[in-house]
Structures are given as structure tokens and as C-alpha cells.
Image (cartoon, coloured by chain):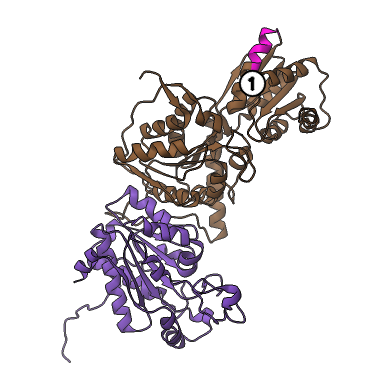
Chain colours: A purple, B brown
Amino acid sequence: MDTQEEVIVYARPDSLTKTNTHYCPGCTHGVAHHLIAEVIDEMGLRDRTIGVASVGCSVFAYNYMNFDFVQAPHGRAPAMATGVKRVFPDKVVLTYQGDGDLASIGMAEIVHAAARGENISVFFLNNANYGMTGGQMAPTTLPGQKTTSSPNGRDVETQGYPIRASELLATLDGASYVVRRSLHDPKNIRLAKKAIRTAFEVQLRGLGFSMVELLSTCPTNWEMTPQNSLKWLEEHMIPYYPLGDYKVNPAVAEIKG
Amino acid sequence: MARELWKGNNAIAEAAVRAGCAAYFGYPITPQTELLEYMSARMPQLGRAFVQAESELAAINMVYGAACTGTRVMSSSSSPGVSLMMEGVSYIAGTEIPAVLVDVMRGGPGLGNIAPAQSDYNQIVHGGGHGDYNLIVLAPSSVQESVDLTVLAFDLAEKYRSICVVLLDGSIGQMMEPAEMPPFQPLRTEYPDWAVTGAKDRERRFLSSIYLDPPQEEAANLRMLRRWQEVQANEIRYKTYYMDDAKFAVIGFGSSGRVALSAVRAARAEGIPVGLLRPITLNPFPEKVVEDLAKQVEGILVVEMNSGQMLEDIRRIAKGAAPVEFFARLGGIMPLPDEILDEIHRLAKGPLTLEGHPRDRWLARMGTLN
């Protein structure tokens, strides 16, 4: 048998700790963590990055990402990130927030951070429900979607319509880069990683607020197998939350090109 | 440095700048707004951080983020705004990091009014946010004392990794008095070993108020409590006036204490042996001083601009050693020296009782006033 020298083609990023996550099987949080950590490694930012974790399933993000972290009250991550970034303009500051956190209780904080053009990068995981508390209706829950607090399906007459956070934030002049990607298949995961990289590039160049919305799954609370939940995301979430670039400041377009 | 004429709110802002405050986050609210306005010009001038936040809720969470870097940071607000900040206050306390908060109190509850009051004593001294925590609370009674206590607030916050609140009423924030500014302290260039600064050449750090495992939360609660015992042992501050031979004592903090001093002086001129205790740290409270004072005097008069929030502390500490009477004006009205003098006359004339509640007797007297 020939012996060949082993070449590492893929390894755990330095920016991820060796801790096992508490995420449910099939949940896409792990993928999102991995992508962010890979990009931070590739860009050599680990020793100058400060993360802001939010409240929700990703409350323990700081246990899994191997760089400095703080942990915000529910919805306040953009405010906390503002505080960190204004003291340390040369550090890379990111928030990692879910849809209940960002688009409901933290709507004021995210809108104003974007409006101010805070030079931070926001990673927004949208899985159309409150995962940590057991699958309640979120501002992003689709019309008709059953959750534990919309047991008959979200009735838009009484429970209102889902919020499209990327489209909303893209209207603000302070937002430089706002895009929506999805984590439901390898091709889209690769596109998501590219967008994450662009978000950090925007911050490094001082171009202002950047946000990557990542459509995500919640198999446990959706009561689906991981595979079916990926399919459900593709068939139900993407039509309501189209993937695409919602705001690309001309200066950002230059770095992309 | 020479004494200059300063408005209270502006003086506190300049004192904070000189104490090395590197970042300010706030939201406009009367009667505190001048502090924010002053900072909006002064901080950028010095290349420091200033953000007018979208709400007090955001402001305190910006403070939370900045405080995690170990730098000197503050916010300021007034009563309704401070209510909105209570979430962040609890989180900052639970994360055990230093921050300074200035509360320029106004009349309440609710929207209340914009006139001076002391009705947030309980909120600031006895809690306000959720969970077990203590704030260091400093209560100035003049513009100069506001300046001095603002500088002290940054030192104490850092020393005990705690929030330090400078608690004053709107009249001190709004009035102008001569005051001497402290010397300029340089900004921090080194950061404490707990601060989040980017994991360069060291293990990563994280700052959080979450302890999901109950024994860990208990350990954190006990650690904070033990640190609080140190604050209690080292940081009690108060001022007494004419107490050496006093048979009667007035107790009041901030503006109430200051107005009471005029009344005490007038009473002394009439030959009434009355003194004044003005607590400066409301938390930790000068309990031993009150305990000893209660044994010394024949009667105590508590004066506040609230419905007797500190009164309950005085009654608890005095343990019936001396009868306690109470006088207050509410709703943004300041007590007048003559009103307090009348109360001192009543106190000196007697008879005094340990029965009933002083608030009830005061309320009955207020019936004839309003």
C-alpha cells in the first residue's frame, strides 16, 4: 500500500472553540457559527474581534466562538455593539441575533444602529419562530404558520403580518450592506459565506452598517426532520423572504467587484 | 482652579469629562437635558465618544457595551428615563462592571412633571431592576458637591466594579452656583484584566450576567454581596451640622437636607438645640450614625421631597429609640425653610410619641394645607 502524506484540506476554524454546541440536530445555527468563524480566520481578525451575543437559542454563542464576547439583554445587541465600537473603533464588532431578538423586542435598536450607520456587522438568523422558548410566534412567522402561540396558524387579521427586516433596514441611508441569504443547501451556504466576508470588509473599510440575514431552520419547533425543514425553508420561507441584495452602497459594490 | 459660575447639569458633565469619562450615551429629558447637550459638544471636541441614543433603554445598553471594555463611561437621565434604564442597570450590576449614572429626579409617578423631587429614592436605593444587586448611591446638595461626587462616582464604580448613581433633584441640576472644577485626569490607556478588548496574545474573555447553573448564580450573588459588605465598611459618607449638643435632629438628603440646614440655623438662633444629619451615601446608608443619633436625641424630624421613602429606613434603624416625625412636600414642590422651622418648633414643643406612623400625622396636617 502506498503511503501518502496527509494534507489537511478542512479543519475546525481557530475562531471556534472545541465545545460541543447545545443546538438541536439539524439546526442551522452551527452552520452560521462555522461560516463566521471561517471568515474571521481567513481574514485574520480573531484577535481584534468582539462579538455581541443576544437572547435566544444563540445566547451561548460566546461559548462556541473563540474570541472576546459580551452578552446583551434581549434585543439590545446593536446598542451594546454601539457602545463597544464607539470606544474601540479599530476593533471588529459583530452581533449575532435571532428574529425575535432583532425584529421584535430589538426593533428600535437595530433600526437606529442602521440609521446611525454604526460601523458594525450584524448576523441575523431568521427561523420564523422563537426557538429557545419553545416555538412561539415571532414577527417573522409566516401567515398561516402554526406555532405554540398561534396554534391555529398565524391569523394576519389579529396577529398581523411578518416583518421583512432586510427590506426595511435597506431603506435607511446609514445602512451600507444589507443582504438576505439562506442556509438550506451547499450552494446557498457558500453564498452566505461570501456575504459574511463582504460584511466584514464593509466594517474594516469604515463604510458603515452591514447586515447579513440568514434564513435558518428550526426542526425541533417546526416538528420536522432536519431534511424536511430544509425543504420547508426553501418552499415556504424563500417565497416570502426572497434572497438577494437589498442595499449595496456604491462604495461596497466596488469591494465586491 | 478658580471658582466659576456653573449650572448643575453642565458642572456634572464637565466633572465627568475631567474624571476621564471616555464615552457618554444619553437621551434628552428635562430637567437633565443640559448634561446631554454639554456632552454633545464637549466629548467630540476631545475625540471621545458621544451618542444621542434612540431611547434611554438603548443608552444604558450602549453604556453596558462600553463598560465591558473597562473604560470610564456614563449616562444621565431623569426619573421616567431612569425607569426605562432599569433593564440595563440590572444587567450591568449582574455582569459586575463599572458605570456611572446620573439621575436628576423630577416629580412623579408617571409622566409627573419637570419640577424637582426625590421620589425615586426607593427605585435607586432599594432596587428598581430585577434580581439581587446594590447600587452605590451618592446624593449631592449643591453644585460643588455634584462635581466632587461625580468624580468620586467614577472611582467608586471602578473600585467595586459597580454602578454608581449620582442622585440629585432637578433643582440642583438646574441652578447655578460657584464651583471649582477638579483637575483633568488623563484617559485610560490600560484596561483591567477582565475587560473585553480583543483576544490578542491571551485567552478569550466574555462578559455576561447569565449563570444558567443555579449554584453558579448563587456563587455570583454571594460574591456581589461580599463586595457590597466592603462598600458598606469603607464608603459611608454623611455630614452632620450642630449635632454635638443637639436634643433634636433633622435628617434630610440632597436639597431637602440643604433647605433643612437653613431651618436648623434659624432654630439655633432661637436657642433650640437642633442639629442636622445629611446622608451623602444613600446606599450604603449611614445606619450606625442614625442609630447613635436616635439614642442621643429626644426627637427626629425626617424631611424629604417624597412621601417618606427614606423615612422608612430611619424608622427601621432608629428602632424606637427616639420618636420620629416627618415632613415633606411632593409633586415637584420644594419645602421652604419656614415650613421646616415650624416643624422643628412642633418637635421641640412636643409632646412626641412612638405610637402611630409619622406619615399619617404629616398627612393629617397636610389636610389643612391643601
Residue B245 showing in the rendered view? no
User: Mark 1 sits on what residue?
Assistant: B260
Q: Which residues are magenta?
A: B263-271
Instruction: Inspect the image, locate mark 1, and give the three-letter code of the amino acid beneath it.
Output: Ala
Q: Chain of mark 1?
A: B
Q: Nearer the viewer, residue A190 or A115?
A: A115
> Residue B333 placed where, x, y %?
64, 30
Density class for disc 1 (Cα within 10 Å; few <14, some 14-19, many ≥20) is many
Q: Is residue B224 above or below residue B357?
A: below
> Does the magenta segment cover residue B56?
no
Taking the image as shown, residue A17 lies to the left or right of residue B324, namely left
Quadrant for the C terminus of chain B in the image: top right
- Residue at (54% x, 61% y) in the render: B213
> Residue A248 placed where, x, y %?
28, 68
- Residue at (31% x, 55% y) in the render: B199
Name the secondary structure under disc 1: helix
Quadrant for the N terminus of chain B in the image: top left
Q: Nearer the viewer, residue B279 or B201?
A: B279
Taking the image as shown, residue A46 lies to the left or right of residue B109, namely left
Q: Nearer the viewer, residue A47 or B130?
A: B130
> Does the magenta segment cover residue B264?
yes
Q: Main secondary structure of the magenta part?
A: helix
Taking the image as shown, residue B168 lies to the left or right of residue A127, namely right
Q: Is residue B208 above or below residue A177?
A: above
> Residue B118 placed where, x, y %?
61, 34
- Residue at (50% x, 26% y) in the render: B175
Residue lying farthest to the bottom in this orientation? A1
- Residue at (16% x, 81% y) in the render: A5
